[in-house]
Image: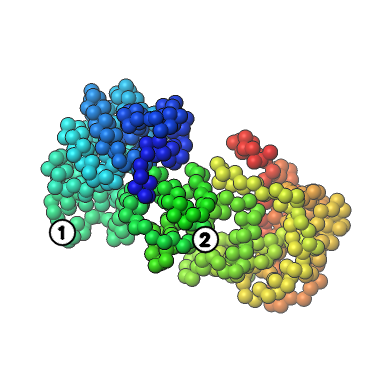
Amino acid sequence: MAVDGSFSLHSSLRRLLDRCPKLQCFLQFESLARRGDLVTEEELVNVLVGVFLHPSYTIPLMGCFRPIAQSIVDKAVALLGLVPNLRSIPEGTACEVDPDRVLDGVVNVIEIFSQQGRGLDLHELACLAFCHALDMSPFLLSSILSYLNFAPAPFVRFSLKHVMVETQELHITRISYRLLLMEPEIFTKLWDWSCFIDLVKDPCKSDLTWCGVQILSVLLKLGYKATENLNIGVEEAFSCVLRWEEFCQDTSLKKAGWYVEPTDYVQKWPVLLYGPSGSGKSALISKLAQDSGNQVLSIQMDDQIDGRTLVGAYVSTVDEATFCGWLFSATKLVNPFFVLLDPEFAHNLGVSFAARGWIPREKRPDPTILGLEVWGRKFSNPVCLVFDKNVAAVDGLLALGFGFVEVGSVTPVSQNGNPKPRIFRLRDEGAIINRSGFNSEGIVAVAKRLGAQHGKRKLDETSSSSPSSNNEVKQADYVQGVHTLSQYVDYLVINVSSPNTPCLCMLQGRKQLKDLVKKVQAACDEMQWGEEGPPPLLVKIAPDLSNEDLEDIAVVALALHLDGLIISNTTISRPDPVNKNPLVV
């Protein structure tokens, strides 16, 4: 139903299909969508009831079709009443079944599970669906009770002594507890809950123990003191509460949206609306656009964006009220928007934010156990961030809590690097392909910024050569980097491994690397140092080297007493399934 209270079968169907794109692939839904305003409630209910029990579609379906929810639930109850045995379990199914995997491509859950003889699995899906429906629409209680009065208890699997994994036990227990909290007077008397007495005796299953004790406290009307001894610690019990709240939040945003009063919205910045499918986000956007007379650009996040990184919904009004409030820190608000930007622009924007201090600061000191001392240098923790090529945001990046940051690679003169586009996202792999090359503002600009940082922060610097096929020119570039920058850093890195810079990887050969390291060591010896001496010297190598190449590098490292190796730079290999990603081409 729309925010303004209007309801249309066809428009509600379109909203459901927009929120659940997979449904558009089913012929039944495609046919209904083509009928437009000619579609009838009976036709719609006959199709919707097939996916009503699907865990991915119950909430969006209820959100879009609340005015006809009674008809959908009544139809589902009638069909479930025709299932021969709601306790049946196929032979050999001793492990948990992933419903999303099993139900992928299923448009009629009741029919499929009934044909497969999976009555108990179907019954548990029904209990979850009815739990969501009742939470969102309490007026459905009588219809849902008409099913639960003839069906077994949602936790009947416990009494059947069926082998289950822990997550399946916990899922069943949570559904049972959630139903019990909704109507304790009814469900306390409806089923025999004694099986939960045994569940609370296993201290190794903290969530299951906690949930079982809560059930018993409701059934026996126990006070707080009676539930103190859970055989789990206070911190773990608190974690159980948080995980329980997370389990129950799937319908909360939708219900909150139904009670938002009309108001004058004045939000002028991008707004992120976060909630389960069907929670009314699109309807709210449309209503705001209609009331304000403005055009609104809305972007639907896809499955590649982890919901845990999102913030929640926030709408600024003239009285500074909030629609849902900030759920997490403000930084997480921008994360989903970054994936909509060009990858390199998003990276540069992140550097800019860090340079201005527009990112969170870790104010807690690192635990002393994380501290380490290497080469006579002390670091508060061993985690390094390699993000800033031009020393533009060192303070902001260190403030995030990293023990040190690596800056560079730095080239003698300013250069643009490789042609754009040169950074590509691989969303399925959660990775990127970086073909930037050495885009650097040059040694002079970097030296000025490093000089401002000197004595304040732990830094390291990566020195690299400009593209050239002349080894003497390349060596001179590295020497210039030592003379100009080494006085400001905690250690130096010779980068000979960039896969995106012509001829650079040739310096990883035994003779070439040996000559280069000697030149850099000589440059360090020419300078005057204090008590700490010259900064340690490391070499960064590629991950695609042959065993022979690795042996050559090891020989040079040992012979010239290098302080360390950085393993490794980015790879040039493209294993499957990356090879099949069009962004790689």
Residue 388: x %, y % from top left: 65, 61
**In percent of the image, x 64 and y 37: which residue is there?**
582
Q: Are marks 2 and 1 in contact (CB under 8 Å)?
A: no
Query: In the rendered image of this protein, does residue 453 appear above or below residue 547?
Result: below
User: Percent from the top left, x then y, of residue 224?
Assistant: 18, 60
Q: Which residue is mark 2?
A: 269
Quadrant where the C terminus sits is top right
- Could you tell me the amino acid type at mark 2? Trp
Residue 152 in view: no
- The label shown at residue 363 is none
Q: Please name which of the two marks, 2 or 1, marks the residue nearer to the observer.
A: 2
Gap in Å between the C-alphas at discs 2 and 1? 48 Å
Q: Position of residue 128 (x, y in %)?
A: 29, 39
Please state if 509 lies on the left or on the right of 252 as rendered: right
Residue 313, position in %: x, y?
A: 42, 56
Instruction: Please state which of residues 191 and 94 is positioned toward the viewer in this rendering.
Output: 191
The amino acid type of the residue labelled 1 equals Gly
Nearer to the camera, 395 or 203: 395
Let me know if residue 420 appears in the view.
yes
User: Which one is nearer the viewer's eye here, 324 or 543?
Assistant: 324
Q: Which of disc 1 and disc 2 is earlier in sequence? A: 1
Q: Name the quadrant containing residue 575.
A: top right
What residue would you read off at disc 1? 223
Image quadrant occupied by the N terminus? top left
Mark 2 surroundings within 10 Å by alpha-carbon count, few (fewer than 14), some (14 through 19), many (20 or more): few
